[in-house]
Image (cartoon, rainbow, N blue to C red):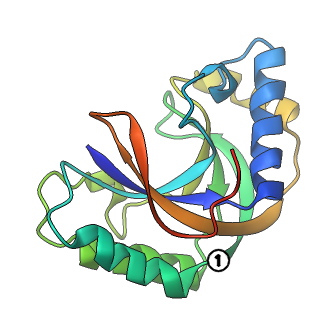
Amino acid sequence: MRTVELLCCPALERTVRTAWDRLAEAGLPSLARHGHPTNRPHLTLAAVEAFPPGVADRLAVLFATALPLPVALERVTVLDGSAPLVWLVRPDPALTALHEAVWEALHGVPGQRPWHAPGTWVPHLSLALRFRDRDRRLARAVVGGGRPAGALVAARSYDGDTRTVQPLGGDFPAD
């Protein structure tokens, strides 16, 4: 599997990582416990089985003109009732247009995940995986009620087979 992801500016990344830490300190599931070096706050635009030749270059052209992209976070919630705990990202017109352009660049590529499709996609930054809906209220209290803003500043692709990332453009924040 190959993803297309956007990375946060340093300030927004610190905000999300702080939420991860607070959740872990409260004994709740948290991505703070996921120690792989590629683990960082990101917004997934698409996932496919593999990139055919030329796709990474087409995506890089898109990101060269679209990034940085200002974003605002909304509420913390659990997707699908008992799945990831996420911080929703406001789907403003620029983000929605970029998402649609990525899908157009991936048109016909096998293995597209339907939950990332335009019209279905819920833009978010993940805070925890396999989260219980009954703990949502506590998680909101732990994370806090703020609605931070920042920017998405770089794009990458995660390769699930090799567990590595490939830069796709933008100004990569330091790890």
The quadrant of the picture occupied by the C terminus is: top right
**Count of picture labels:** 1
- In the rendered image, the residue lying farthest to the top is 27
Q: Is residue 37 above or below residue 172?
A: above
Q: Where residue 154 sits in the image (x, y, percent)?
A: 58, 66
Circle 1 — which element? strand
Give the labeled residue for mark 1: 69
Q: Is residue 87 above or below residue 140?
A: below
Residue at the location (74% across, 31% down)?
20
Is 138 left, or right, of 122 in this rendering? right
Q: Where residue 34 sits in the image (x, y, percent)?
A: 59, 23
Location of residue 107 by image quarter: bottom left
Q: Is residue 71 above or below residue 83?
A: below
- 100 or 60: nearer the viewer: 60
- In the rendered image, the residue lying farthest to the bottom is 65
Residue at the location (57% across, 31% down)?
37
The quadrant of the picture occupied by the N terminus is: top left
Disc 1 residue type (three-letter): Leu
Residue 11 in sight in this render:
yes
Residue 100 in sight in this render:
no
Q: Where residue 149 sits in the image (x, y, percent)?
A: 80, 65
Is 174 left, or right, of 4 in this rendering? right
Residue at the location (80% across, 27% down)?
21
Q: Where residue 115 sits in the image (x, y, percent)?
A: 33, 52
- 62 or 25: nearer the viewer: 62
